[in-house]
């Protein structure tokens, strides 16, 4: 397992993490979920994610029971939950969203369900247009200062909203958010690779969800979208209904999607790995990704997923280019008015740095730890600037 820092914090999270949204509303799934979490822990996964809105709180109950059964020390796991959608099947006006009242009371209720005195990260699950941002930041600062959470973050916020929250925290001397939980995969790239560039440049971390695009990229649906799976078994779920309506109703769009999926499968076969491993490795190749959250229903799925760590090194510049040519959805960055060419993204620049010679890498590491040579870092910055130009 590979462990990465959560942005600029000192917290280390496994590059692959486990989220329990799938089957979260089924109390009968608890025994299977316990076995999956046990195996995830054995494979080196230390980050477990849930939310008050998953199964109206049932997901938190099941995760709490599973971790208690696991018997590990609380300090050894990283646990997160999310506040916004509420944890009850009711319509009371203050039982959801991001008022100070619900942030504090909602988190306390989550902690009871999780059977833990604190979470490591609490996320604002969505942006609340009807609550002043200062109220939101002050409330999350309060739960951190009171020890109910160690860090707080955002989920599916725009870059402008995140930067606004950080600005409010800095102006008022409050605890700022440090991590975003967005969707990121081969079919959803624009926000992560382009919009969030200014956010990631500030050292913001990320715990990305749906690296397989609801399993679409796994290889299971390459030939038949209607094969037995979540789109059949979970079609009653509101989000799955929305997902199908948005992505899988137009036959022409589905045919184009499957052609890309089959092409991805061929690349994976040539590399000697599964298609899901390739798709997840592609996500993890982006070093702005702190961890990729996966949801599974079988132990063999989590075992297959973890193998994506070893597959990262197989994605050479040539393989990356093959994937780009197949999907043709590289985000459009801003225009460089000196060259009239698109600026390179942070992902592009990281890949360029990988092409540095051994002597350059050795020199770079050396001068970073020898103060009297620190001025030489200027030349490496110049090289990056040249590559961006």
Image (tube, rainbow, N blue to C red):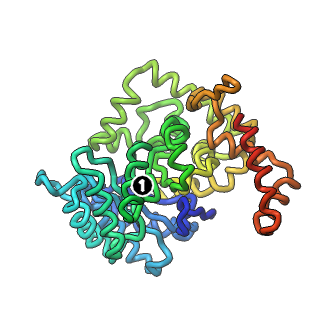
Query: Could you say which is closer to the camera, residue 94 or residue 375?
Result: 375
Image quadrant assignment for residue 236: top left
Quarter the C terminus occupies: top right
Q: Is residue 212 left or right of residue 130?
A: right
Q: Is residue 195 left or right of residue 154?
A: right
Quarter the N terminus occupies: bottom right
Circle 1 — which element? helix
Q: Is residue 118 above or below residue 269?
A: below
Tell me the residue at 57%/25% (across/down).
259
Query: Could you say which is closer to the camera, residue 123 or residue 338?
Result: 338
Tell me the residue at 57%/68% (across/down).
44
> Which residue corresponds to mark 1?
166
Residue 146 in view in this figure: yes
Query: Could you say which is closer to the camera, residue 30 or residue 313?
Result: 313
Tell me the residue at 78%/62% (across/down).
374
Tell me the residue at 76%/52% (across/down).
378
Q: Position of residue 321 (x, y in %)?
A: 70, 33
Residue 33 in view in this figure: no
Q: Position of residue 209 (x, y in %)?
A: 46, 49
């Amino acid at each position: 397992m590979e462990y990465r820092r959560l942005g600029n914090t000192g917290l280390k999270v496994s590059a692959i993490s486990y989220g329990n949204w799938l089957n979260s509303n089924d109390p009968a799934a608890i025994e299977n979920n316990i076995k999956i979490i046990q195996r995830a822990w054995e494979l080196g996964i230390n980050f477990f994610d849930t939310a008050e809105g998953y199964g109206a709180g049932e997901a938190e109950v099941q995760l709490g029971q599973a971790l208690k059964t696991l018997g590990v020390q609380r300090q050894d796991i990283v646990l997160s939950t999310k506040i916004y959608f509420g944890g009850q099947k009711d319509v009371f006006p203050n039982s959801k969203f991001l008022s100070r009242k619900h942030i504090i009371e909602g988190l306390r209720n989550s902690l009871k369900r999780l059977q833990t005195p604190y979470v490591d990260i609490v996320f604002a699950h969505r942006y609340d247009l009807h609550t002043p941002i200062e109220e939101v930041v002050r409330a999350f600062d309060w739960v951190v200062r009171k020890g109910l959470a160690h860090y707080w973050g955002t989920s599916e916020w725009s870059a402008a909203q995140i930067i606004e929250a950080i600005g409010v925290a800095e102006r008022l001397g409050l605890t700022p958010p440090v991590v975003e939980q967005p969707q990121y995969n081969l079919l959803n790239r624009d926000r992560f690779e382009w919009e969030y560039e200014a956010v990631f440049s500030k050292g913001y971390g990320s715990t990305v969800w749906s690296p397989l695009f609801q399993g679409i990229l796994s290889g299971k649906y390459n030939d038949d979208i209607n094969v037995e799976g979540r789109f059949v078994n979970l079609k009653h779920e509101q989000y799955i209904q929305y997902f199908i309506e948005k992505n899988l109703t137009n036959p022409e769009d589905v045919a184009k999607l499957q052609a890309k999926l089959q092409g991805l499968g061929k690349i994976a076969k040539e590399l000697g790995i599964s298609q899901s491993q390739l798709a997840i490795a592609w996500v993890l190749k982006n070093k702005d990704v702190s961890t990729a959250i996966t949801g599974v229903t079988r132990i063999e799925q989590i075992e297959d997923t973890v193998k994506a760590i070893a597959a990262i090194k197989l994605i050479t510049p040539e393989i990356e280019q093959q994937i780009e040519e197949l999907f043709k959805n590289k985000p459009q960055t801003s225009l460089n008015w000196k060259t009239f060419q698109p600026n390179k993204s942070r992902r592009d620049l990281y890949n360029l740095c990988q092409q540095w010679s051994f002597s350059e890498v050795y020199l770079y590491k050396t001068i970073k730890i020898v103060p009297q040579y620190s001025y030489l870092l200027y030349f490496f910055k110049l090289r990056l600037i040249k590559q961006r130009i």
